[in-house]
Amino acid sequence: MNRLPGRLRPWPWFRRLPVVVRLVLAVAVTMSLVLAGAAGLVYWRVQAALDRQLNDDLTTYQRSLDQAVRAGGQLPPGPSGSRRQVLDAQGRVLGAGLHDRSLLTPAELSAAAHGAAVRRDVGSLLPITSNTLRLQARRVTADGKTRIVIAAVRRGHRDEALRELLAQLALASGLTLIAASYVGYRTARAALRPVERYRSGAAGLSDGAQNLRLDVPADRDDEITRLGHTLNRMLDRLEAAAERERRFVADASHELRTPLTLIRAELDVALHRPRSAGELTETLRSVDTEVQRLIELSNALLDLEELGTAQHVSRAPTDLADLVGAAAAPHLRTAEREGRALTVDAVRAIVDVDGRWLRPAIGNLLDNALRHGAGTVRLTATVDKGGLRLCVTDEGRGFPPEFLPRAFDRFARAAASRTGEGSGLGLAFVQAVSAAHGGTAHAENTEHGVRVVLTLPC
């Protein structure tokens, strides 16, 4: 498998962190961006308002200086802490109130001399410096001579207000970020606490705990609660499957052990002393019977395993009367040999079923009725409201009441002894065929015997 380039998988360390830590980091980063954006917007709006006021004061002071220079009078005083300077076209200081040197760079002096308004700040907001100013220079013509008038006002109040705003924004943002991270942490822990509880419960299951179920609140309906209910249903299915597997292994081992034991006993007896040809033939016939029983049992188990998935069921339009007749034909001779009646009543209809599996299922029902029942065996097949209903009845004593709930289980037999005739897989096969078709199968005792009903959608 080709590995993705490293640049497509940023921060691999982040994915190795616990979920709670990742959630808190995500909240912290997101809140940091939001707070930074909000703080930047507030700072920009306040700075714009303070700059606008400062520029208005500077412009007013500049105009008064310009008028005084044009009139040739004394330069008026400005706002508290303000400064002024008058230069000639070559940059020499004519009227000093700020420095003996020109505050303008050669480039700024040239721009002002050509009629451009020059404005810049002296000093920085951070780190704190003294005598921070904002100056503005413009060209003024007085008595036919060019003068550069520079007005400067202090930025102290403006800078102090902005520094105070920055400190308050930083404090508020920091506290908000800490509070948001804490709330995110507590929320994440609270949200994931049931998941950790479910994980601990699942760990108990892996340690061999029996009848384990997760403690899911009944008064909630959120994602975590639904996950808990889903896991409990999964545990129910796992427990049922494990129980079926244990029962299947126990029953299968018993069913396989019996014929193998008989075969071994027959061979031991045959080998113990010399046997006549007739005795050897009888032994081989007995062994053949048990081998045939093993083959039938193995084939039945394989058929049940194959029917475990609906992919092995291939539906096709099938004539119901022909299907039922073909399934019942071999059993008509059996019933006749035993002096019993077998009646078949099937409607003429086309049904969508898999005859390959349904035919032996019907045969199993008839075989059970002839082998374990008594009297007349009746097979009826009807189609009603899109459903196929197959019913087999006999006139025997019926199933023991305690056996009915597990009549379709594998290796289940009504007789107390397991050494009797049959493997106990016939009705299990019928149940598997009905389930593979999406139908149902059930057995019940009636006044006259046993009724087994197979219902399939068709």
Image (tube, rainbow, N blue to C red):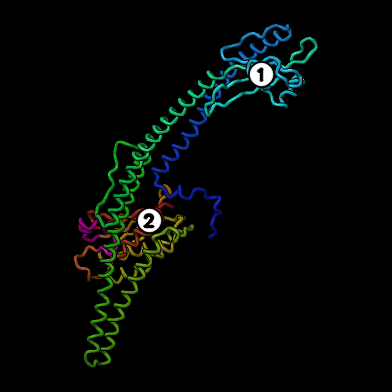
Q: Secondary structure at mark 1?
A: strand
User: Could you say which is closer to the camera, residue 54 or residue 122?
Assistant: 122
Mark 2 is on which residue type?
Ala
Question: Which mark is drawn over residue 179?
Answer: none
Residue on which disc 1 sits: 136
Q: Which residues are magenta?
A: 395-412
Classify 296 as above or below 196.
Answer: below
User: Could you say which is closer to the camera, residue 107 or residue 386?
Assistant: 107
Residue 221, horizontal then vertical, whole percent: 35, 37
Q: Main secondary structure of the magenta part?
A: loop
Residue on which disc 2 sits: 435
Residue extending farthest to the right is 144
Q: Say whether residue 398 is magenta.
A: yes
Mark 1 is on which residue type?
Gln
Distance of label 2 from label 1 (alpha carbons)? 93 Å
User: Could you say which is closer to the camera, residue 346 or residue 362?
Assistant: 362
Whether residue 139 sits left or right of residue 278 in the image: it is right
